[in-house]
């Protein structure tokens, strides 16, 4: 690990797009964390049209004696492009990602650095993501709906993520050397208002294939803002539709496409059958969302070359 104050051990990448009010709160929250002398903060502005640059420049000026902070403007639209720009600029051996609407706990930096130092076989880690709802939490937001809202709590013990899970962008840290196997795929991930995803799943699949260990640590905790605009059925239905599109975009080749179509057909039959027995609001909404995911997958597979999200 690096202990020279001019060469950080941890690079914190915060990607942002037109959310300067939330970004300001996230940046200000960093000032209360322990071990600030071992970090740098890289804010990647992904073509914002609000006062994001001004907010970051003011933060840099006011805190230049305590926090190393850099502003980068990334022209290519998309969260993956923004994250890759942050990785390229990072000088630390560890790259941590924090959403522009997430507030880390005071021990966040210490937890990340100490765990990586003590566990050289660990390639990546993540932790709890606790929601902060702008308005009342809908009654249907339970169980399967929590992950689409990036609500994560795998308990109070350190453990490897199960094969079906991985750290999420609001709260994750990765050894920089792990990106030698590939960075975030540009075709996946949020692009402006398009709710594409799947870029994190792809990346962690590559890390696992290379033999990297991926760990959940309960003390690596952040509070994640959930705006009222996302606490509506229309939003979660659209989120599932774009998840289906993202799933379809990851498949290439005839046999892979045929396998995906067969799997999608089986899923459609399952959802149709389970719809007959859904008795509560959450169950009915979940089946509707799953059908939208299927529709998204079929749309992108059967219309390759067309813009995602178009009909």
Image (cartoon, rainbow, N blue to C red):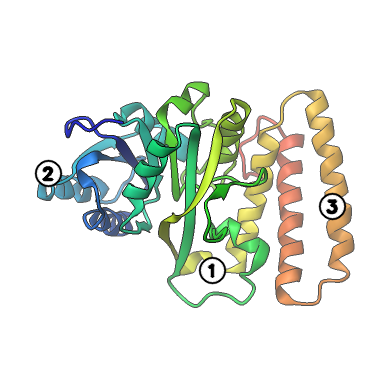
Q: Read off the residue under disc 2.
A: 64
Q: Residue at x 56, y 61 (%)?
A: 155
- Location of the C terminus by quadrant is top right
Instruction: Report, in whole angstroms, how far the alpha carbon at label 2 lies from the one at label 3.
Output: 55 Å
* Above or below, 28 relative to 14: below
- Badge number at residue 311: none
| Residue 54: image location, x then y, percent | 19, 48
Residue positioned 38% across, 57% down in the render: 102
**Quick one: 111 or 64, which is closer to the camera?**
111
Residue with the mark numbered 1 = 231
- Picture coordinates of residue 28, whole percent (x, y): 23, 57
Quadrant assignment, res 275: bottom right
Q: Give the SS element for disc 1.
A: loop
Residue 66, percent from left and from top:
14, 46
**Front residue of this view, candidates 208 and 191:** 208
Q: N-terminal of the two: label 2 or label 3?
A: 2
**Which of labels 1 and 2 is toward the front?**
2
Q: Check disc 3: other Cα within 10 Å, few if <14, some if 14-19, many if 20+.
A: some
Q: Identify the element where label 2 is drawn.
A: loop
Viewer-proximal residue, 250 or 91? 91
**Residue occupied by mark 3:** 268
Q: In this rendering, would 147 be left or right of 50? A: right
């Amino acid at each position: 690990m690096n202990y020279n104050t001019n060469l950080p051990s941890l690079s914190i990448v915060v990607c942002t797009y037109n959310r300067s009010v939330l970004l300001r709160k996230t940046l200000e929250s960093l000032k209360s964390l322990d071990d600030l002398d071992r970090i740098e903060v890289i804010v990647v502005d992904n073509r914002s049209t609000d006062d994001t640059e001004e907010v970051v420049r003011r933060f840099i000026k006011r805190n230049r004696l305590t926090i190393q902070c850099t502003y980068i403007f990334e022209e290519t639209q998309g969260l993956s492009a923004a994250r890759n720009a942050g990785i390229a600029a990072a000088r630390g051996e560890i790259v941590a990602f924090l959403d522009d609407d997430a507030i880390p706990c005071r021990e966040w930096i210490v937890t990340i650095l100490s765990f990586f130092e003590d566990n050289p076989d660990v390639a990546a880690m993540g932790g709890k993501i606790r929601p902060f709802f702008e308005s009342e939490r809908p009654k249907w937001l339970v169980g399967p709906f929590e992950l689409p809202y990036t609500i994560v709590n795998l308990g109070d013990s350190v453990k490897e993520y199960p094969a079906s899970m991985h750290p999420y962008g609001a709260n994750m840290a990765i050894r920089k050397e792990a990106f030698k196997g590939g960075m975030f795929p540009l075709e996946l991930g949020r692009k402006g208002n398009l709710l594409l995803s799947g870029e994190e799943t792809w990346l962690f699949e590559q890390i696992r294939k290379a033999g990297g260990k991926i760990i959940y640590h309960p003390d690596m905790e952040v509070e994640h803002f959930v705006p009222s605009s996302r606490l509506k059925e229309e939003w979660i239905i659209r989120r599932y539709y774009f998840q289906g599109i993202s799933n379809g975009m990851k498949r290439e080749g005839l046999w892979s496409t045929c396998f995906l179509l067969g799997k999608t057909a089986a899923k459609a039959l399952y959802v149709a059958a389970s719809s007959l027995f859904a008795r509560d609001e959450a169950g009915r909404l979940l089946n509707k969302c799953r059908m939208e995911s299927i529709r998204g997958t079929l749309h992108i597979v059967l219309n390759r070359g067309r813009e995602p999200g178009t009909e």
